[in-house]
Amino acid sequence: MMIDIGLIRHSWLLVAPSAEKVAMHFYGRLFSEYPRIRELFPPAMDVQRDRLLRALTQVVLGLENGEPLGDYLGQLARDHRKYGVRPEHYPAVGHCLVAAMRANAGGAWLPAYDEAWTSAYRYISEVMIQAAEQDAEHAPPSWIGTVVSHEMRTPDIAVIHVEPDQAYPFRAGQYATLQTGQWPKVWRPYSIANAPRHDNRLSFHVRAVPGGWVSTALVRHTRPGDIVLVGPPRGSFSLEEARTSHLVFLAGGTGLAPLKALVEESAWAPDRPSIDLFHGVRHGAEAYDVYDLRRLRAQHKRLRVIQAVSEDPGHWPRHTVVDALEHHRITPDGDVYVCGSPEMVRNTVQRLLAMGVRAERVHTEFSGEHPSFVPS
């Protein structure tokens, strides 16, 4: 199928300054003309509007990158199955999306843009529908998970172990979206804090954030025996990205979770890499996983764990993870994995680049990820 990428990008420049209006117009028209589709979405739509805009941007920028875009669309389609998305929903979304852009282009929209977007969206739909059908042959839309343990490690952080009802195939470093009984249709992503295990259990490190519907439900109101829904595994944050035998892991808070999974996986590798793991917290009392990290260090043999405390007046020296890296005179001469809050990741990556670390050697959890048209 021929897609005029130039027309797609030129038309997107027309509506990008009014992107928020495009998103509002899109959802308003979608729910008005196709009210049954509204059932797929959560009550609050603010977060979803932002995700739509980011998704549109990524698709526009990625149209000429055939294989990477195809991989993304396939993963997106597999993830959409948990919402109940069906093939007949795709034309409705495409129709309303083009109408929303046309209405917010300030009168500069051309019929050729309609044709270009229709062709592009038809291609996207075909790829996603095929990927969803293939996935349905061997995997459920979502897994029913039973909470088998719930440990409060700090007043705001819980370590939760979940047992899915069927085999859950994932790779160390990936994440899953979770839905609780308290908030139907609201899914939030959480990194899986362990490598695949024989008992099929998944571990999640969850911090309750102010106003966080799902995180608060998981930390404050979830108990062993409760049921959560687990979406399909996502992400490409893995040891396969590494090309060196010395790795530096920089974690902020519960960003420790996927890095811990990677350490577990590497512990059993015949050519296990040496790993310097820095876990950064603001206050010493927030170091919630010390016991498990000691256990991993004993298993791995080539793992060093360093705690970095940045704001605790009773702790000296006070360091961010990059401060601690420099303090211990560890040269990040190999691959560096960074995981934490968006601000922590942004600041840490900037520091690493300023230190001379090559950009291709820096790996972050969501660097290759894209949001979806449907809430997650």
Image (cartoon, rainbow, N blue to C red):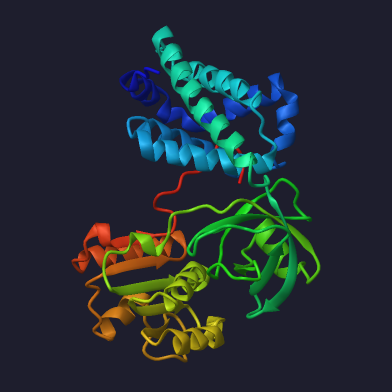
**In this rendering, would 251 be left or right of 24?**
left
Residue 53 lies, in percent from the top left, at 48, 36
Residue 343 lies, in percent from the top left, at 42, 61
Q: How many marks?
A: 0
- Residue sitting farthest toward the right: 225
**In this rendering, would 29 be left or right of 261?**
right
Query: In this rendering, is residue 357 above or below 367?
Result: below
Query: In this rendering, is residue 335 above or below 72?
Result: below
- Residue sitting farthest toward the top: 111
Q: Is residue 328 visible?
A: yes
In depth, the one of 127 and 357 nearer the eye is: 127
Residue occupying image coordinates x 74% and y 67%: 147
When asked about the image quadrant of residue 250, the answer is bottom left
**In this rendering, would 178 be left or right of 65?**
right
**Quadrant location, the N terminus:** top left
Residue occupying image coordinates x 62% and y 29%: 27
Residue occupying image coordinates x 55% and y 84%: 292
**In this rendering, would 315 be left or right of 97?**
left
When asked about the image quadrant of residue 366, the answer is bottom left
Residue 287 lies, in percent from the top left, at 53, 82
Residue occupying image coordinates x 58% and y 26%: 26
In depth, the one of 47 and 66 nearer the eye is: 66
Residue 38 lies, in percent from the top left, at 72, 31
Q: Is residue 45 visible?
A: no
Query: In this rendering, is residue 30 above or below 52?
Result: above
